[in-house]
Image (cartoon, rainbow, N blue to C red):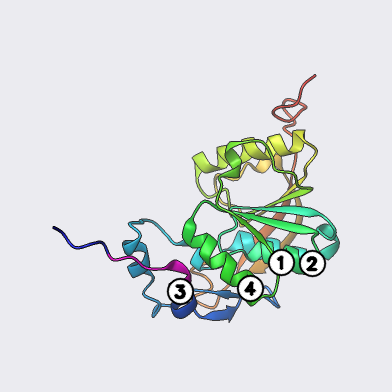
């Protein structure tokens, strides 16, 4: 009989191997972030996962959106907020700190959920973690959607765009944080702010990259959002 596969508890691994550190460009927030000594690949291999552990690092789209919210807390204050593709929870934590009435952080990756819960506790905020793929259905009962770094791949961008259209049709506005990646539907974006923030890779070199906060707008070519009638 072959030996049982070795498993790693993601919460314990993250707490022990990914040290808490201040997020570059986002004052007042600390996250468990991977370092070269973290041995993150061991946890991923134990879980049978491939690809980049995006939740283990700050990315420019999330950093710029978090910074914008902290600089302008009235953006989310008193509102029920959904952080779409939350990853480490950076944007969700910023929203909670800025006075959001409630925050749902949605991400289907179980390791991201483990990191998010640890990061929320480390920053003394309450966040509802959801491992459901919210883009597959109707918008949840929220007042605003925050979407940082969700337009990095064409198929994902199309799925997110369709979901945000359903949100607009339900009267739910959406803010997007992105450094200008190719799949971003630029014609649907109205610029609100620009910051120079750390991005994965650039942060490791001590550098920053321009990143932007947008309002997601209706499709001007149709004059209405997807899902709207009349």
Q: Are marks 2 and 1 in contact (CB under 8 Å)?
A: yes
Query: Label 4: how many residues lie within 10 Å, few (<14), some (14-19) or many (20+)?
Result: few
Going from N to C along the chain, the mark reached first, 1 or 3, is 3
Label 2: which residue? 98
Q: In the visual, does 48 lie left or right of 138?
A: left
Q: Nearer the viewer, residue 63 or 19?
A: 19
- Could you give the CA–CA distance between mark 2 and mark 1, rounded to whole angstroms? 6 Å
- Residue at 75%, 31% in the rendered image: 220
Residue closest to the far left: 1
Which disc number belongs to residue 121?
4
Tell me if residue 10 is in the magenta stretch: yes
Residue 139, x across and y down, in percent: 69, 40
Please report the bounds of the magenta region as a residue range: 6-12
Going from N to C along the chain, the mark reached first, 4 or 1, is 1
Query: Label 2: how many residues lie within 10 Å, few (<14), some (14-19) or many (20+)?
Result: many
Query: Label 3: how many residues lie within 10 Å, few (<14), some (14-19) or many (20+)?
Result: few
Label 1: which residue? 94
- Could you give the CA–CA distance between mark 2 and mark 3, rounded to whole angstroms? 29 Å
Residue 50, x across and y down, in percent: 35, 56
Query: Label 1: how many residues lie within 10 Å, few (<14), some (14-19) or many (20+)?
Result: many
Residue 199 in view, yes or no: no
Q: In the visual, does 206 lie left or right of 79?
A: left
Q: Are marks 4 and 1 in contact (CB under 8 Å)?
A: no
Residue 211, x across and y down, in percent: 65, 60
Answer with the quarter of the image where residue 6 lies: bottom left
């Amino acid at each position: 009989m072959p030996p049982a596969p070795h498993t790693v508890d993601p919460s314990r691994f993250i707490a022990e191997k990914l040290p808490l550190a201040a997020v570059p460009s986002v004052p007042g927030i600390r996250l468990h972030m991977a370092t070269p000594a973290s041995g993150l690949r061991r946890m991923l291999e134990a879980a049978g996962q491939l690809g980049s552990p995006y939740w283990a690092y700050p990315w420019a789209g999330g950093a710029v959106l978090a910074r914008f919210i902290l600089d302008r807390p009235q953006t989310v204050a008193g509102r029920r907020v959904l952080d779409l593709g939350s990853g480490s929870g950076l944007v969700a934590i910023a929203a909670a700190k800025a006075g959001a009435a409630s925050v749902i952080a949605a991400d289907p990756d179980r390791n991201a959920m483990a990191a998010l819960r640890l990061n929320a506790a480390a920053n003394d905020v309450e966040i509802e973690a959801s491992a459901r793929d919210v883009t597959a259905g109707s918008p949840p009962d929220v007042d605003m959607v925050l979407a940082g770094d969700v337009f990095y791949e064409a198929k994902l961008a199309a799925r997110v765009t369709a979901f945000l259209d359903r949100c607009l049709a339900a009267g739910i506005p959406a803010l997007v944080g992105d450094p200008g990646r190719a799949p971003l539907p630029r014609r649907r974006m109205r610029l609100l702010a620009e910051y120079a923030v750390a991005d994965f890779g650039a942060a490791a070199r001590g550098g920053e990259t321009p990143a932007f906060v947008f309002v997601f707008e209706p499709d001007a070519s149709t004059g209405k959002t997807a899902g709207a009638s009349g």
